[in-house]
Image (cartoon, grey):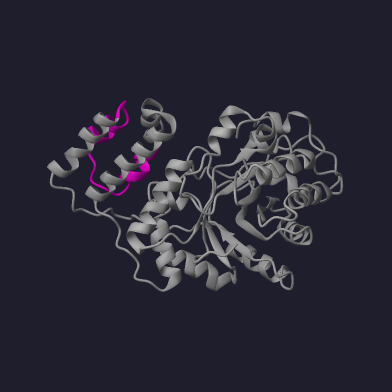
Amino acid sequence: MELPSPVVLAPMAGVTNVAFRTLCREQELARTGSVSGLYVCEMVTARALVERNPKTLHMTTFAPDENPRSLQLYTTDAEYTYRATRMIVEEDLADHVDMNFGCPVPKVTRRGGGAALPFKRRLFRDIVAAAVRATEGTDVPVTVKFRVGIDDDHHTHLDAGRIAAGEGAAAVALHARTAAQQYSGEADWTQIARLVEHMDGTGVPVLGNGDIFRATDARAMMDRTGCDGVVVGRGCLGRPWLFAELSAELRGLPVPEEPTFGEVADVMVRHAELLAAHDGEEKACRDLRKHVTWYLRGFPAGGDLRRTLARVSSLAELREALATVRDSGLADTRADDADGARGRQGSPAKVALPEGWLDDPEDAMVPSAGADAENSGG
């Protein structure tokens, strides 16, 4: 799979649905004249996909003009991995499959999933091999995303990179934090550089993830680490136009200017309209509420506007509330610290793991039967 720009939207639960991906693509097209990156669907569970869970199938919705279609799987079991990936291939559900081994959420790691799983090298190998085997004879690539490790005493990224390459993964992506860090502190880009060096000779590209908040961050990461591209998560929250800036910077084009308050208001309305088309108007307005703080960051939005936006229940109410931005004369203002760090950070914490998980890294036993079921539906 060839892309004009080495920029990837990281899957984020409850965020990177078809509405948000469409919005990011529209913003890139409007600001640069083309769509050049890869926009990945929010994570879905392999088992839930195989069982045709209605919620999961709805989450895998792609826009009619979305190309390529990229889907990320969460899995702890090679059998369900194979069946889910084979289903994706045979039913033409997506053009690319990414594997999630980076989630640090306790309910995932305590059952052996996400960032906990690469510690079990044989199990990790079995799962990656199953996904690749399911795509044999097709042009659907399988990529793998993981973290530096469980904590500073249990780094897994170097082994994970080599194992993934050996089993046929088309690329790997590293979030340069451990699971114990969650999203706190700063990403350690030196670990990306270590992985790039470790992967030398495999022919498998390495993508870097962590603390990409502005166009120059992507260039800095690639220059400092030697990675082949960047994966962007929290930096685009409330800033779907960030991908236009990243693409322009990396392709040598003029970097678009940050939008005005009035332009952001228009984007918020468009976001709500896309959500309504996907989930219905009432749910769309509820869903948009979590995006409001991200969109308004740095703008002189008073408490009244913020409270009103937090309560809107229809598109008409949303349009009426945001019309006040233009009426107030603030439409031409630009945000302060628009490209600063954003999104959840949390605090470092001990990683919840299954009992005895760290006893034997060569144990290939699949985690308890509830590991997939607990996260069924995404």
In-image side of 127 versus 235 (left or right)? right
Magenta residues, start to end = 290-314
Instruction: Determine whether 58 is above or below 154 in the image.
Output: above
**Nearer the observer, 252 or 135:** 135
Using the rendered image of the protein, determine whether residue 318 is visible from the camera's viewpoint.
yes
Instruction: Determine whether 3 is above or below 44 in the image.
Output: below
Q: Quadrant of residue 351?
A: top right
Quarter of the picture holding the C terminus: top right
**Nearer the observer, 153 or 243:** 243
Residue 247: percent from left, percent from top: 43, 64
Quarter of the picture holding the N terminus: bottom right
Residue at screen point 74% across, 69% down:
202
Residue 212: percent from left, percent from top: 48, 58
Residue 63: percent from left, percent from top: 47, 44
In-image side of 176 versus 359 (left or right)? left
Q: For residue 313: magenta?
A: yes
Using the rendered image of the protein, determine whether residue 342 is visible from the camera's viewpoint.
no
Instruction: Determine whether 42 is above or below 340 in the image.
Output: above
**Nearer the observer, 135 or 234:** 135
Residue 130: percent from left, percent from top: 78, 48
Q: Quadrant of residue 55?
A: top right
Residue at screen point 20% across, 53% down:
333
Q: Quadrant of residue 167?
A: bottom right
